[in-house]
Amino acid sequence: MAKKALITGVTGQDGAYLAELLLKKGYEVHGIKRRSSSFNTARVDHLYKDPHETDVKFFMHYGDMADSTNLIRLNQKIQPDEIYNLAAQSHVQVSFESPEYTANCDAMGPLRILEAIRILGLTEKTKFYQASTSEMFGKVLESPQNEKTPFYPRSPYGAAKVYGYWITVNYREAYGMYACNGILFNHESPIRGETFVTRKITRAVARIKLGLQEELYLGNLDAKRDWGHARDYVKAMWLMLQQETPEDYVIATGKNHSVREFTEKAFKHIGINISWEGAGIEEVGKDASTGKTLVRIDQRYFRPTEVDHLLGDPRKAQNQLGWKAKTSLDELVETMVKADIEEAERDALCKTSGFKTLNHYE
Ligand code: NDP
Ligand code: GDR
């Protein structure tokens, strides 16, 4: 019998890479998607088969992290061997705008699933993975950060995820459940959401190259992050659920870079060297050879409280899971810029060919 996995947040970046990985490993994969007025399954459409076909291994179910009865019913129906809880309001800046919703989804969400496992008597059968985050370290008290570094969250998102972390530890200790936290540092890819800084930059670089955009507006250029590739990181999630004992692991590359450096690297791929002039909110990034301004600062992208500097220590994962980040930052930037150029080429073609978008129709 194939193992059954349930992935919450299957339509997100990590959900898509993880579903692909588990299907390759022979799992029957069930994903939870939200009802939306427009299609929200683009990242997993290539995995989907019409349910009337034979040998279907990938199933989608409507659900929401805010809906306990839905989560209980789905777990009762699927009886999963492994649950990967990836669903979250995952944008740090948005969490300042919607703190209560973020807490409901990101803190109460994992609790609802853990309770579903307990209520249904699945504590012996079902293993649970919680998508914890380096944002829990927040105002960094030591560097690099490892599994023992104290938490000091700096956003409603970070605070909600700290609850998700501890409730996972608590259910492991209280009920003997196989429950793990993956404390993942930032991981990106060509299917990263467009409003996270890396994708925002690579997408803008591509659109500037194709003449679809003039300038890129950013916030804090000096924030440092430990950036890896999402495809590498979902392997660590799976490995965590295949061990003798459930434990928590930091997953990171062990190297960090600033948003400024990321921007410079991305522009280099289209043959532009960026030179920085001015300071603070007045700072601009110019094309060093033409003097044209390409990057500007906008106050709206600064957060009320910032996480200045994150750097992970992945040695426990290396030693116990045999996991190591495979993709360098240069490779990651190159892959992302290339993919965004292809997308921008499609947009440019539509524009020059006079194709209409839906809202142009009467
Ligand atoms: P994404 O934002 O790409 O995906 C989030 C997923 O959660 C989407 O499928 C989204 O659905 C779904 N979702 C959001 N709200 C709800 C809800 N109320 N009910 C059901 N589903 C919901 O995030 P990533 O894939 O990047 O991250 C996956 C997880 O890992 C998240 O929990 C995130 O907080 C955490 N994390 C991410 C890191 C990263 O660098 N990427 C690092 C550390 C942790 P929809 O598609 O409809 O919006
Ligand atoms: P982060 O990712 O907050 O680390 O959370 P994000 O890419 O949003 O920001 C990284 C850093 O870049 C700075 N920044 C900007 N950020 C955005 N989004 N847009 C901008 O224009 C901009 N300019 C500068 C930010 O201030 C920040 O310092 C991500 C998410 O995936 C979380 O879900 C996950 O838990 C953490 O990574 C680890």
Image: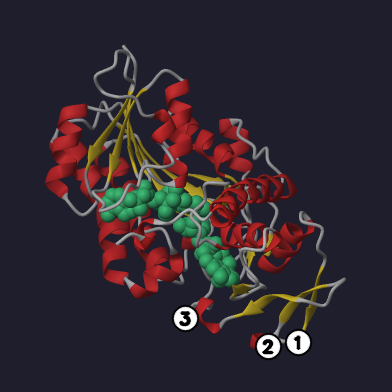
Q: Residue at x 46, y 20 (%)?
A: 25
> Farthest residue toward the right?
289
Tell me which residue sits at (61%, 51%) in the image: 340
The amino acid sitting under disc 3 is: Pro
- Nearer to me, 194 or 303: 194
Secondary element at tag 1: loop
Q: Nearer the viewer, mark 1 or mark 3?
A: 1
Residue 282 is tagged as 2
Query: What x and y, as percent, mark residue 239?
Result: 49, 31
Q: Which mark is residue 304?
A: 3
Q: In the figure, residue 145 lies in which quadrant?
A: bottom right
Q: Do the residues bearing badges 1 and 2 touch, measured as CB atoms within 8 Å?
A: yes
Kind of residue sitting beneath label 2: Glu
Q: What is the secondary structure assignment of the residue under circle 2? A: helix
Q: Which mark is residue 278?
A: 1
Q: Residue at x 23, y 37 (%)?
A: 61
Q: Nearer the viewer, residue 50 or 62?
A: 50
Instruction: Judge left or right: residue 151 versus residue 3.
Output: right
